[in-house]
Amino acid sequence: MHIIQFDSYFNLTSNFAKLILPSPLLIEREGTITTGERRIRLVRKVREPVGEALEEWKVYCKLAKMFDAKGFDYKNVFEIFDEAVKVVKAYNNVDAKRVYSGEDFFADKKIKFYRLNPEKFKGFESMRSKNYPFILFTFRSKYHFLTNEATGKSETLNRMKEAGPFFYLNKEDAARLKIRNYDEIIVKSKAGSLNGYAFISKRILRGYVGAHFHFESLLINKLFPLEFDPRAFTPNFKCVAVKIIKRKK
């Protein structure tokens, strides 16, 4: 299998790629982004791409031309979006010209207002056991984004006090386990084990441990068994029962 990677930075995926093509940053490209709420947002180019970086659609068009493929004679990204609006059912209610004039649209739905009812949720207490008395949950850092390829290169963001790859503990739990800030600890689940550093936080409730999922140096998903939600069919990377051991010096 040959992996071709489009990216603006070298990252873990680069180790597996047979070919790496430089991709422009978001501020170096034109187009639209459809968000998780299916809102279509316009992106305007702020500066030209650095070096030989090309937007992906331009690479595809060049490749299609090499193979004498038809239908790839696009002059700009608006033509591609306009075609998608016409042929993709989810975008049928979208006006491409109005989107490019700065107006918001939603793919596959209209703006509606609903009365929201709380979801019935039993909680995570059933996960706990004598051997694994803590619930570890993952969350985002305000200083980093997703798997940290871009934000992790910022010296300013990496200097933030709570921006590192820590296990966040409740003050009372930490005191009982004789753990202090920056002590090295071992966190174990039925699926795996990780070494990391403790950070005591007022935001963490007793019996819980928090961890960010952004860091290569703390591959938190190793603690999660391969389990899928029966309704959404998504893997559980959110909560798992663990135990905490203070590592001996």
Image (cartoon, helix red, strand yellow):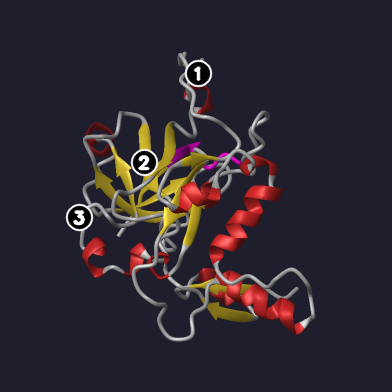
Q: Amino acid at mark 3?
A: Lys
Q: CA distance from mark 1 to mark 2?
A: 20 Å
Q: Which mark is residue 210?
A: 2
Q: Nearer the viewer, mark 1 or mark 2?
A: 1
Examine the structure image and report whether residue 238 is included in the region drawn in magenta.
yes
Position of 215 relative to 18 (above/below): above
Which residue was labeled with disc 3? Answer: 161
Residue 209 picture location, percent across and down = 37, 38
If the image is split into quadrants, where does the N terminus sit? bottom right
> Taking 99 as reference, is 6 above or below it?
below
| 212 in relation to 15, above or below | above
| Residue 129 visible in the current orientation | no
Name the amino acid, label 1: Phe
**Kind of residue at disc 2:** Gly
Residue range of the region highlighted in magenta in the rendering: 235-243
Tell me how far mark 3 sits from mark 1, CA to CA: 34 Å
Q: Tell me the number on the disc at residue 121.
A: 1
Left or right for 45, reference 87: left
Q: Position of residue 97 (x, y in %)?
A: 51, 51
Q: Crowding near pointer 1: few (<14 within 10 Å), some, many (20+)?
A: few
Please say if the residues under marks 3 and 1 sit with CB atoms less than 8 Å apart. no
- The percent coordinates of residue 73 (x first, y second) are 67, 73
Along the polypeptide, which appears first: circle 3 or circle 1?
Answer: 1
